[in-house]
Amino acid sequence: MLDDELPTHSPSPEERQNFYQPPADNELKELIPGLLKAILLIIWAERMDWFLGLHMGIYQDSDQEYIMPDAFLSLDIERFYDEELRPNYLLWDENIIPSFVLELLSATYHQKHTGKWEKYKDLGILYYVVYSSRRRYDPRFEVYKLVNGCYELQPGNPVWMPEIGLGIGCERGNYSGVTREWLYWYDADGKRYLTPEEQVKESAQRLQQESQRADRLAQRLRQLGIDPDNIT
């Protein structure tokens, strides 16, 4: 395929058909990455130098071969080009290798996990995160870091990723009305970043506390013979 025939960020209908990507195979594969992106949109709201792709193909060459993690994060990159956003992630166009990939393993994970492991390593992706709540004996949550060309398991939960400026881990919580174990982002001190719902609740509680303090102050002023409504 010639360079001027390579697919772009605005593919034709024929290119869209050729670049078909299968949907996620269970609901958690939608909700867990979606939660991570929702949190990131809050904590990195002012930054425009990152991109978190969900169920999006990473195309390595012009032969239309791709690998599709459940989520991947790239840094030092345009967050979006225009209102059409990215239909896919073309490495020869982006020129940025993702720093992080997430795989949510299913019942048939062995073969897929082995094959993707090698591809992510060959691409040079720094962090490879694996999560499966269906594991009974093996760890459900694992973070691997590429060190000297090999993936090494990182200890702890959460795991701090200094090159990214985020930690990732799992704990029980409530999201989308479901109480279970979820993946979350953490800061350098191991403190979990709040979900959008938790942010709203915390803001509401803070406003309520401030209102109560104002009411107590007004009551105290009235006891001292001062009308708080006349204070300028």
Image (cartoon, grey):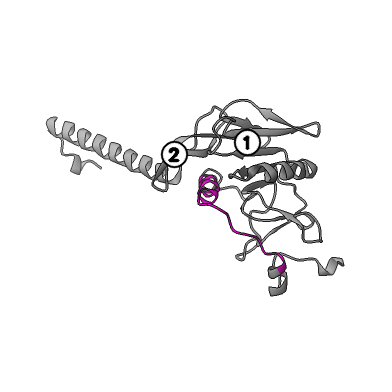
- In the rendered structure, the answer to whether residue 218 lies left or right of residue 83 reads left
User: Is residue 25 one of those drawn in magenta?
Assistant: yes
Assign a secondary structure to mark 2.
Answer: strand
Residue that lies at the very extreme toward the right in this rendered image: 2
- Above or below, 20 against 229 in this view is below
Cβ atoms under marks 1 and 2 closer than 8 Å = no
In percent of the image, x 81 and y 57: which residue is there? Answer: 61
- Above or below, 71 against 83 in this view is above
Residue that lies at the very extreme toward the bottom in this rendered image: 13
| Residue 104 point in image, percent of width and height | 59, 44
User: Is residue 117 one of those drawn in magenta?
Assistant: no
Q: Nearer the viewer, residue 232 or 174?
A: 174
Q: Nearer the viewer, residue 212 or 205?
A: 205
Q: Amino acid at mark 1?
A: Gly
| Residue 55 point in image, percent of width and height | 62, 54
- Location of the C terminus by quadrant is top left
Assign a secondary structure to mark 1.
Answer: loop
In percent of the image, x 67 and y 41: which residue is there? Answer: 110
User: Does the image show residue 179?
Assistant: yes
In percent of the image, x 69 and y 50: which residue is there? Answer: 77
Residue underneath mark 1: 165
Q: Which residues are magenta?
A: 18-39
